[in-house]
Image (spheres, rainbow, N blue to C red):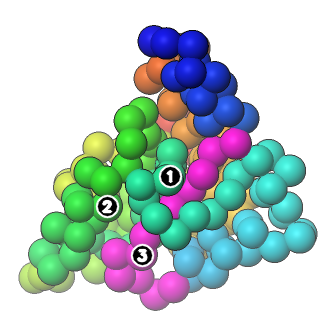
Amino acid sequence: MGLLENWINKGRLKSPWVVHFDCGSCNGCDIEVLACLTPVFDVERFGIINVGNPKHADVLLVTGTVNHRNKKVLKNIYDQMPDPKAVIAIGACGTSGGVFRECYNVVGGVDQVIPVDVYVPGCPAKPDAIIDGVVTALDVVKAKLGLGEMPKVTVID
């Protein structure tokens, strides 16, 4: 890696940019993701910023059950993100398909379509757990850059 890439990667490790995608859920986990952005939790003190474009994101937050209609969209968003990247599956629906997993049009959890690095279970997932998941995902990105070890715990409870 060149000097410029090292400098950019050092900045990425201190300020993870996240993009949120809802595959189709009851919006319970989506509300909790938005709660993380409020002054009560103040994720900006960790440098976490929510962006609208996957081309600028380091971490992908996915809520909801993946179905046959949106699996291509999810894969497309994942492919647009620059490497190294981390994926967090949030909530019971994102981790396993939740209450919808037996439906005819449901593929299952996020890991049925793209690789998942961190799982944050719960229905809905708590904002504290989501923030811990993003911090763990930051360690995953650091490990993918070769600057640290892969975290042993990737299920945040």
Magenta residue span: 15-27
* Residue type at the position of mark 1: Ala
Q: Which mark, by number, is residue 22?
A: 3
Badge 3 marks a residue whose secondary structure is: strand
* Residue type at the position of mark 3: Asp
Q: Nearer the viewer, mark 3 or mark 2?
A: 2
Residue lying farthest to the bottom in this orientation: 26
Badge 1 marks a residue whose secondary structure is: loop
Position above or below: 110 against 151: below
Q: Which mark, by number, is residue 30?
A: none
Q: Earlier in the sequence, mark 2 or mark 1?
A: 1
Badge 2 marks a residue whose secondary structure is: helix
* Alpha-carbon span between mark 2 and mark 1: 10 Å
Q: Nearer the viewer, residue 66 or 18?
A: 18
* Residue type at the position of mark 2: Ile
Query: x, y (%) of residue 111?
Result: 28, 51
Q: Earlier in the sequence, mark 3 or mark 2?
A: 3
Identify the residue at image location x=45%, y=42%.
86
The residue singled out by tag 1 in the image is 57
Q: Is residue 5 magenta?
A: no
Identify the residue at image location x=13%, y=75%.
68
The residue singled out by tag 2 in the image is 77
Q: Residues within 10 Å of mark 1 (few under 14, many from 20)?
A: many
* Alpha-carbon span between mark 3 and mark 2: 12 Å
